[in-house]
Image: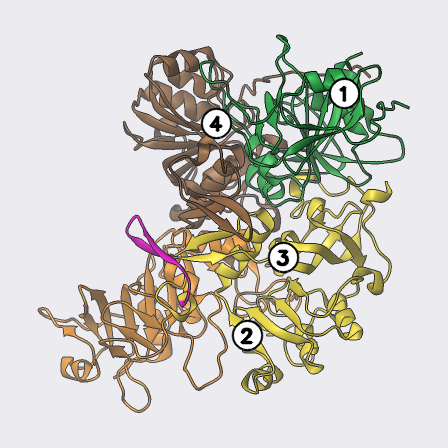
Chain colours: A orange, B green, C yellow, D brown
Amino acid sequence: MALSREQVAMRVAQELQDGYYVNLGIGIPTLVANYVPAGIEVMLQSENGLLGMGPYPTDAELDADMINAGKETVTAIKGAAIFSSAESFAMIRGGHVDLTVLGAFEVDQNGNIASWMIPGKLIKGMGGAMDLVAGAQNIVVTMTHADKYGNSKLLNDCTLPLTGVGCVKKIVTDLAVLEVRNGAFHLLERAPGISIEEIQQKTAGKLVVDGDIPEMAFS
Amino acid sequence: MALSREQVAMRVAQELQDGYYVNLGIGIPTLVANYVPAGIEVMLQSENGLLGMGPYPTDAELDADMINAGKETVTAIKGAAIFSSAESFAMIRGGHVDLTVLGAFEVDQNGNIASWMIPGKLIKGMGGAMDLVAGAQNIVVTMTHADKYGNSKLLNDCTLPLTGVGCVKKIVTDLAVLEVRNGAFHLLERAPGISIEEIQQKTAGKLVVDGDIPEMAFS
Amino acid sequence: MAGFNKVVHSYEDAMAGLQDGMTVIAGGFGLCGIPEGLIAQIKKMGTTDLTVVSNNCGVDGFGLGILLEDRQIKKMVASYVGENALFEKQLLSGELEVELTPQGTLAEKMRAGGAGIPAFFTATGYGTPVAEGKETREINGRHYVLEPAITGDFAIIRAWKADRYGNLVFRHTSMNFNPMAATAGKITVVEVEEIVEPGELEPSQIHTPGIYVQRVIKGNFEKRIERRMVRQD
Amino acid sequence: MAGFNKVVHSYEDAMAGLQDGMTVIAGGFGLCGIPEGLIAQIKKMGTTDLTVVSNNCGVDGFGLGILLEDRQIKKMVASYVGENALFEKQLLSGELEVELTPQGTLAEKMRAGGAGIPAFFTATGYGTPVAEGKETREINGRHYVLEPAITGDFAIIRAWKADRYGNLVFRHTSMNFNPMAATAGKITVVEVEEIVEPGELEPSQIHTPGIYVQRVIKGNFEKRIERRMVRQD
């Protein structure tokens, strides 16, 4: 069965390593913070200028001057640092953030990503997404494998305006985990009960299925 | 009579205006701080990262972590700010410093300055001088009008490697105050008792003498 | 002392000299760290044809959003403008021009403007609509876009504490774009929560040295929260 | 927690991995704010053919100057090297290469290296020997030189206080080049006067966020004064 949003977040959380600095985008990526594996510690970077983002505040802790990149009120952990937007993106652009997790409208087999603009609809802007995909050491994209009409979001070539070029390394969808390499999507894992055929059918871009493809494990 | 070093500094101090941020180079420029006119206040910038440089410390105040750009121990005034070298030169390069006073080996009639290197002698390096002459809103050069052999330091074209191009606005020598404008040195003031003829004779570059040239006033 | 006493006592004095057609750089991220009173003063002045550079354009009825009501903004340079309906309406009707700029590039363009760096290369936006019409270059095997600096006739920012020299300290994440905006204005006006005596701010802990600041005014802030999230503990 | 405990307990561990031919960026201005123990460790290791990037090269017998004694430095990138005789001797004999870089350009090159900006334009050095062989460009009527960023295999810096996450605070003007150097090293090693618990440093008052720092060691510093000047009061 296709994964729930929480399960996608749980699977992404398995990509975390001890000591990682991680930037989590809005939506499913935000949920990843709830599933950090036991025994490892990661530091969350919020691009408005906070390294060491903590949970939402209690009513007593609520402070309008303490927000995250989603403009939500947050807290800072012990050992956090707060800095300017220029410093924040120096970190991001300079490759100091180990992992960025973000959503997307489309990804293609060359690692291009489209996530910020659908022509004809209102243009909201890219925020920090273009800097994040250009700067982080590792980019994991989370999204549904296909849209609500069944159209694949894993394409030969993105059709929407790009956010970044050749930057996506890994994709976690509700159906599969895939690695982008050598101009193809390499299938690594299937969601429990999802067949390779279904993944193949919902992947418009070039899919490489090499050997046995295990089901994702959620311990 | 030719001005003493202190008198040159006194004359340069007349260029200060209330509220100026000023960077003073090593040597005579440093002395300018002793002659800030009554009723005005300036803020001294030291390019190693100090805005609001104060006097030398007392023995009790001495601190190895508190130095100026000449690597001398100093103090900070109330209202000082301390910052990184990148921030310091952001200020300088960005044109936020109102006035830079520095020495030179040569200046030419196009406002070029040579102040950091004499080929054949040891190369010590330019330090912050190239950034200062490229960045400050106003550059005043202090130097003797001629070298010890009587050779003019105010030239048609600098002969030594340049520090900056077309940046010098005003020159205060032991003999005169001159403005650099339209490819010529415009004589503004003479040192007390110094004749226009002597200044002319010791100025190798194009000198413009327009109307009466007053003697410098030291009130 | 007069030369370094940058404190003004009215919003009229704070924004004196602002004229139609000028460029205003504003600090803030969403509604966090915005100079509420200075924005209100611009609305009151009715200045028009402004180019406003800010990460966001407030929301309907608050922050920079109020400058849309009387169509004071001609062009907006921002990274994200998805928070207000009036913005959308004016954009679609062609009354408002927008230049979308990646957030990190926007921050760096302001810093560069203040720091005398007229242009810099960044990988951000290469191969995307952001790079269209811009010079690109391959350096050590990566592709980069040349981005020009931004400066403004005015910068309006918010800080926590200031002294009369204009030295500033920001509070928590309300820092955001404020330090860079401060450096990039010909006239930088700061609205603060508290004015302290010189010497009260530890020199090495000052976020924005006073050299970047021309005017300081004490404000009162609503500090509206855009997305109030709390946990039950 | 292991992943963020960056404190090491020996200079051997602090500089582990340094190899012949590497580039080392060092913080400090003159003898102020230099990582004395890390420099001593490099001398002890005997690593050679180093490219060292630092505003100065210490003095004879102290600071980076001690790395000249056994000819460990192949090339020096600096703005001012006029303080030691051994440097002069090795330079004149051709044993040592020097790339003189204006101080502000050097600071910005380090910052750019850490910030993912591969190159930037600056007016500094236009028309001088510094611009020779470099691309120049006229932008809005002024002439600029394109300067590439600097990064290093190691950065060695000194700070006042650190926590185990590598968050740093610098003391007075010993800050100087240290924050930029910290960002520009693949492995950044910090020698500090004091290690404090996480949370003791106010988040918004941290000069260098720990993300830039890989290793922290507590040092003991001589803090030699280069030009002792005092007034009689």
Q: CA distance from mark 3 to mark 4?
A: 34 Å
- Side of D146 where D94 appears, left or right: left
For the residues bearing labels 3 and 4, Cβ distance under 8 angstroms:
no
Asked whether the viewer can see residue D170, the reply is no
What is the x, y in percent for residue B17? 81, 38
For the residues bearing labels 2 and 1, Cβ distance under 8 angstroms:
no
Q: Amino acid at mark 4?
A: Pro
- Element under disc 1: helix
What residue is shown with label 3? C181
**Quadrant position of residue C194:** bottom right
- Element under disc 2: strand
Q: CA distance from mark 4 to mark 1?
A: 40 Å
What is the x, y in percent for residue A158? 29, 76
Magenta span contains residue C135: yes
- Whether discs 2 and 3 lie on one chain: the answer is yes
To which chain does the residue with label 3 belong?
C
Residue furthest out toward the top: B149
Q: Is residue D228 above or below residue B155?
A: above
To which chain does the residue with label 4 belong?
D
Q: Amino acid at mark 1?
A: Val
